[in-house]
Image (cartoon, rainbow, N blue to C red):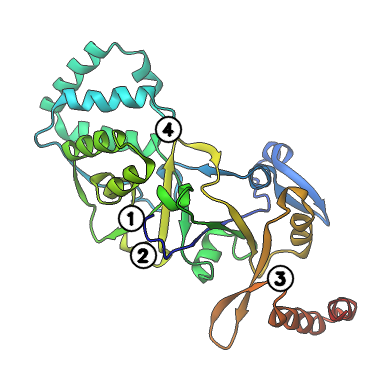
Amino acid sequence: MHKPEITRLYHYQSIELEARHIDDFKRKAVDIGDNIFLDKNKLDSLLDRHAYFSTPMSYNDPFEGDFTLSLEDLDPKELMSIIQFALESKDVSTPSILQSVPQDFLYTQLESVIKQNPQHFAQLIIDTLRLSVGFYCLTEEPEDVLMWAHYAANHSGIALEFERTPDSTCGTMTFEVDYFDVPPVISLSDIIIDFNQANNSKTLEEKARYLSDSSLRKLLYSKTKTWGHENEWRTSHKPGRHDMPGKLVSIIFGYDVKPKVIDYLKSCKELDGVSFKYIKPDKSTYKLKMYDEDDIELQVQRIMESISVGKMDAAQALLK
């Protein structure tokens, strides 16, 4: 398993509904009382143990998925082998127009475009990849202030903790992102060779070992150094909902999650066996700290918070 010393990975997300239109609200709102509404899609995915793999086009980084594609020594016939695999694959989303074009015609057009306008063809390949591959983003860091602010609705969301094992996607087909000052240069010929080699690997473990050192890793797992603090890991799939990449060990609540949201999720029978953890600010260090449900320090903090806002009944309940 790649980096077995990393035993947990985390995914930050919001859980309350962020609807921009009344129709979205009607379709996605889950009313849990006190004028609080959860996002039905995210809640259902959580309860059903699904994850949403999104394309780089939807990310907040304008350079996401950008790289320089070299077409030197490219054989159009080799490229056709990848296109043929993509057409038959369940893991890659291919444009519908490719599925209806005869292969002989497609090969002729590819050869012509590559020779006459290689830069245009290279950009077409990049744009197609950015639309056809979905990613599920994770991190090693469950206590990062910026991550909670950016990806967990300004600390009012949650983080999912996944276990990494040799037989899980988190353990085999999930790799850390490499960060670059400038877009990496990737040879399409190398991509084709590495793609075929990985596809012909006999076992998932063998495929994972090969991918970790191949051009495909640079293709799929690269970002600008601006985002280096995220310590991101990611796994790829066809865009859309798929099984979670590993066993869901715990749900971590941001420090500004509403108590009603916490109570609701803890009451869901589908989450039996999942532990609950909490993030609280440590004002003596300007850092966040994660606590388990039965942590004494967490209980003391809750009591003091209740007293400070005049909620004596809540403080007394916690003391029992």
Residue 223's disc is: 1
Q: 237 or 38, which lies in front?
A: 237
Q: Quadrant of the N terminus?
A: bottom left
Disc 3/disc 2 C-alpha distance (Å):
31 Å
Task: Tell me: 286 left or right of 222.
Answer: right
In this figure, which residue is indicated by the disc labeled 3? 293
Give the mark nearest the N terminus, 3 or 1: 1
Q: 237 or 148, which lies in front?
A: 237
Q: 305 or 79, which lies in front?
A: 79
In this figure, which residue is indicated by the disc labeled 4? 91
Give the residue drawn at x 76%, y 58%.
Answer: 266
Q: Position of residue 168 (x, y in %)?
A: 49, 48
Give the mark nearest the N terminus, 3 or 2: 2
Q: Tag 4's secondary structure?
A: loop
Give the residue drawn at x 15%, y 32%.
Answer: 118
Q: Are marks 3 and 1 in contact (CB under 8 Å)?
A: no
In this figure, which residue is indicated by the disc labeled 2? 228
Task: Tell me: 238 left or right of 274.
Answer: left
Q: Position of residue 104 (x, y in %)?
A: 22, 11
